[in-house]
Amino acid sequence: MNAQQSVDREAPNLRRVLGERDLVLLFIVAVANLNVVPVVAASGPLTVWLWIAGLVLFFWPQGIAVVELSHRYPGEGGIYLWSKEIFGDFHGFLSGWCYWTNNVFYVPTLLLYIVGISVYIGGARFAVLGENRAFVFALALLLLWIIVWVNIRGLGVGKWVNNIGGIGTIITAAVLVGLAAAHWRLFGWRLHAGEFRVAGADWHLVSSFGVICFGMVGLELASVMGDEIRDPHRTVPRAVAWGGIASGILYVVATLAVLLALPQQDISVVQGILQAVTRMASGVGVGWLVPPVALLLTVAIAGTASAWLSGSARIPFVAGLDRYLPPALGRIHSRYHTPYIALMVHAILSCVFVAMSFVGATVEQAYEIMLLLAVVLQLVPFLYLYGALIRIAMRKDLGDAFYGRKTLWLAGMSGFATTAIGMVVAFVPPAGRQEATWLFETKMVVGCAFFLGLAAFFFFVYSRRKHREAVDAVAIESRARGESV
């Protein structure tokens, strides 16, 4: 045994419990985040073209990248593992760090969204609780720890939260589209062709493209749990295809339905879906439908929160095994065989961000503050994802490739360029934002710099510690050989 092997991670004892159906529903609940639809729809009908551009230039290449890289590197860690194998340890850590930390405060945005819409289950008289900060804060934390507890029990249990959430997403979107169709038939098409013309559009609209790219991530999520998938070489490609197609359709039709129901200036970024459902249900005489839809949407977003929390927590788990974060993060539960320490640390940090976001802010402002920073950090790993495709396409020998060289080139270049654009435009203040442009951009730059700098700090500290462990192992081994002689 050499010194480096003595400090490398041991193979985690994880259970393979995810089948093809589980992955399809996981992709739907992770990718088709209905909570981002109001944020995008609030920028107007032109965002439909941005959705289509994102599907072609970002989402399709993402599917190719996930299938190709999970085929080559099927182990636990997903995008962290792929970046590490192609670009080296530091870049793998930075990619995984951004993937994880953005979810540390993206999951709280989902919790705030859940609370904001769950109040509609009790009818209009309870809806005002959605703006009560104390109520929202307490219920968000309760939901967070329930989700953590379910996932500590294992993916055999936690996957059902994801599956039910995926089904809830599909049914909610179907009801939304059905109401839009009935509303259209009774009252006509409220949108005009001129509203879809690009000429003369507000340039602040481009900020929505970053959110759209952010909303389309998720096909890589299952591969983060690569050691917990049954027959991944066969299961992943088929699940990516079906889950990707369903998610793309759901996004476009849901955005159109919200725009049909509400003027863009009236769309709330938290309660926009329920606003649209309430308006259309009242118009077609089925107002009783609002509480059941609120329940379905609550379940759907709860599934999304569970999927992202359980998936992204595998990143610090694997980094802990690799000794680039505290080794305790790499522990698994003796009974449930889950990374319980990583899940609990994720939840604790999310609690901190929920509390910080409420300082001097309304519920809607807190939601938007965390979402905007999550967009940029989430897209950093995708630069590595598409860069990995380009690096593979440049090789003389493609090895055991799933796709041909031309496909890898096209997907890699398209995805990389689109991701870079999405990150840049995320720094453009959304239309209607009250604070000064320089203040908004300062917050974004400082926030991103802080998290990237923290990643470099942890890697530097723990890589030096890992090196010392390797040196100590060599010394111990040398002494043992000398004594035996």
Image (spheres, rainbow, N blue to C red):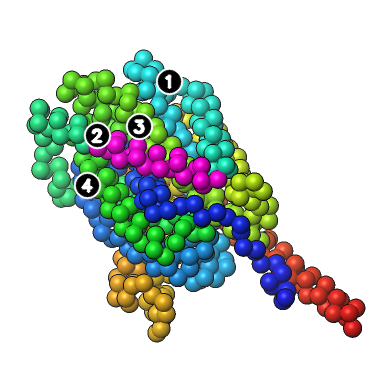
| Cβ atoms at labels 4 and 3 below 8 Å apart | no
Q: Which of marks 4 and 3 is nearer the N terminus?
A: 4
Q: Earlier in the sequence, mark 2 or mark 3?
A: 2
Q: Earlier in the sequence, mark 4 or mark 2?
A: 4
Task: Give the CA separation, mark 2 to mark 1.
Answer: 24 Å
Q: Where is residue 88 in the image (x, y as percent from the top left)?
A: 54, 71
Can the viewer see residue 353?
no
Name the residue type under label 1: Leu
Q: Closer to us: mark 2 or mark 1? A: 2
Q: Which mark is residue 48?
A: 4
| Cβ atoms at labels 2 and 3 below 8 Å apart | no
Q: Is mark 3 on a helix, strand or loop?
A: helix
The residue identified by callout 3 is: 296
Q: Closer to us: mark 3 or mark 1? A: 3
Q: What element carries label 2?
A: helix
Q: Is mark 4 on a helix, strand or loop?
A: helix
Name the residue type under label 4: Val
Q: Give the range drawn in magenta.
A: 154-174
Determine crowd level at label 1: few under 14, some 14-19, many 20+ residues with C-alpha closer than 10 A. some
Q: Position of residue 283 (x, y in %)?
A: 17, 22
Q: Quadrant of residue 151?
A: top right
Q: Say if 288 sits above or below 113 in the image.
A: above
Left or right for 100, reference 429: right
Residue that appears at 22% across and 47% down: 48
